[in-house]
Image (spheres, rainbow, N blue to C red):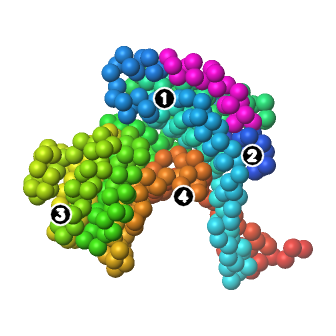
């Protein structure tokens, strides 16, 4: 196994050099071929996914986890459409970030270039195989994918379809590779081969990410937990606050940008809590609250200290009443995961303070947390949502999968003398 993964690394490095030579039109032609191949392979993908779903059901996974794993025709079409959308997006590779000329005549450009080779380690969602592969390809990066055991049949089928469609259109060999092993040792091998990988991106549970961070010998961009908050301020429109809370929690509960903790200003609580509780219960949400919340909603369970730090990924919501904006901000900065946090208020000054002082990658005013997404931001399919501050933060699209280099042009300038003319 170790030798096989190391060989993948060597192959990825060689592929990265070839990928860097492709022009935007060539890459877009290959992407459209990948999308067509994925659509053509839909029956095979659904058969492979059925094997994964049967195995998952026997392991008693939660309904939310099963939903993350499931493929059907609309979801396969969504993956293919996502590839097509990436083909229409501007290619950041070669973009001039800045240019200037020095007094000695040297001209300097800062230009976006591929990172090189990227390892992606992820769990559950088979669509990540497609999203990660095509985003990395569009930006000229070779990719080594290592998915979870629960989706291994689906991942293999998706990767095979992408590779087959891309190869027919000119995709360099070994540009997209899927590790066929799902044991923990394969993660350790991938995380240790810094000679071949420039970057590693883990997507999954907290345990997986902490394992990768502890083992990695190359830079890591972390897609940590999504402990997302919504603060219903004293000056919130009540109907809007209810609608945004329900959407943030229930539109899709098993994702990282779903709401996990609702904070409510004390002055809004008496009128707001019964309304929002009724709306949430109608969607099957279990509510847990602080003592003050339970004085209003007397039949809900007590929230424990652990609830404030829990990413449920399920129809469970913790609720806390706070006395002020300051308390809301302090709670979010203490217990949140720096992913996405929202405020509902009609007070512009209050909203401004919230947006400035909450230390998260995405901060929203009167918007559902579910919009923390690369597609919703106009980036196309996303590689993940980084909770780091370097080198990428928030939804990671194409630009975040590039680095840059300085291209310097002169006329013979030397450090100790004057510029030489073009004629010598």
Which residue is situated farthest in the bottom direction here? Answer: 103
Q: Residue 43 in magenta?
A: yes
Q: Position of residue 396 (x, y in %)?
A: 52, 52
For disc 1, the marked residue is: 70
The image quarter containing residue 105 is bottom right
Answer whether labels 2 and 3 touch (C-beta < 8 Å): no
Q: Are marks 4 and 3 in contact (CB under 8 Å)?
A: no
Number of numbered discs visible in the structure rendering: 4
Structural distance between the alpha carbons of marks 2 and 1:
28 Å
Q: What element carries label 2?
A: helix
Q: How many residues crowd around disc 4 within 10 Å: few (fewer than 14), some, or many (20 or more)? A: some
**Of tags 4 and 3, which is closer to the observer?**
3
Question: Nearer the N terminus, badge 2 or badge 3?
Answer: 2
Residue at mark 2: 28
> Residue 210: within the magenta?
no
Please give the residue where the numbered disc 4 appears in the rendered image. Answer: 377
């Amino acid at each position: 196994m170790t030798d096989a993964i190391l060989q993948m690394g060597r192959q990825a490095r060689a592929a990265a050099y070839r990928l860097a030579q492709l022009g935007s039109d060539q890459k877009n032609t290959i992407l459209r071929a990948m999308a067509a191949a994925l659509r053509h392979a839909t029956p095979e993908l659904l058969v492979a996914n059925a094997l994964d779903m049967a195995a998952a059901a026997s392991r008693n996974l939660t309904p939310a986890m099963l939903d993350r794993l499931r493929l059907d025709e609309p979801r396969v079409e969504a993956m293919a459409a996502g590839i097509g959308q990436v083909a229409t997006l501007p290619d950041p590779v070669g973009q001039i970030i800045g240019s200037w000329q020095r007094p000695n005549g040297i001209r300097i450009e800062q230009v976006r270039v591929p990172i090189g080779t990227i390892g992606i380690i992820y769990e559950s969602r088979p669509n990540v195989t497609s999203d990660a592969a095509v985003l990395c390809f569009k930006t000229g990066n070779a990719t080594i994918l290592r998915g979870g055991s629960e989706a291994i049949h689906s991942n293999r089928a998706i990767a095979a379809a992408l590779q087959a469609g891309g190869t027919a259109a000119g995709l360099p060999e070994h540009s997209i590779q899927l590790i066929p092993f799902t044991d923990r040792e394969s993660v350790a091998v991938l995380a240790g081969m810094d000679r071949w990988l420039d970057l590693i991106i883990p997507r999954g549970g907290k345990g997986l990410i902490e394992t990768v961070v502890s083992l990695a010998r190359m830079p890591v961009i972390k897609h940590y937990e999504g402990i997302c908050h919504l603060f219903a301020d004293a000056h919130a429109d009540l109907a809007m606050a209810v609608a945004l809370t329900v959407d943030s929690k229930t539109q899709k509960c098993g994702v990282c940008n779903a709401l996990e903790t609702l904070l409510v200003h004390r002055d809004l609580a008496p009128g707001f809590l019964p309304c929002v509780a009724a709306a949430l219960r109608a969607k099957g949400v279990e509510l847990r609250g602080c003592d003050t919340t339970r004085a209003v909603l007397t039949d809900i369970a007590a929230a424990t200290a652990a609830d404030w730090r829990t990413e449920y990924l399920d129809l469970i919501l913790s609720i806390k009443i706070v006395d002020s904006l300051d308390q809301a901000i302090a709670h979010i900065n203490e217990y949140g995961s720096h992913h996405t946090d929202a405020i509902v208020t009609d007070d512009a000054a209050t909203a401004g303070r919230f947006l400035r002082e909450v230390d998260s990658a995405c901060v929203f005013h009167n918007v559902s947390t579910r919009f923390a997404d690369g597609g919703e931001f106009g980036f196309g399919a996303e590689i993940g949502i980084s909770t780091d501050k370097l080198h990428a933060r928030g939804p990671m699209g194409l630009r975040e999968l590039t680095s840059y280099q300085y291209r310097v042009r002169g006329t013979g300038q030397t450090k100790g003398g004057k510029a030489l003319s073009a004629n010598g």
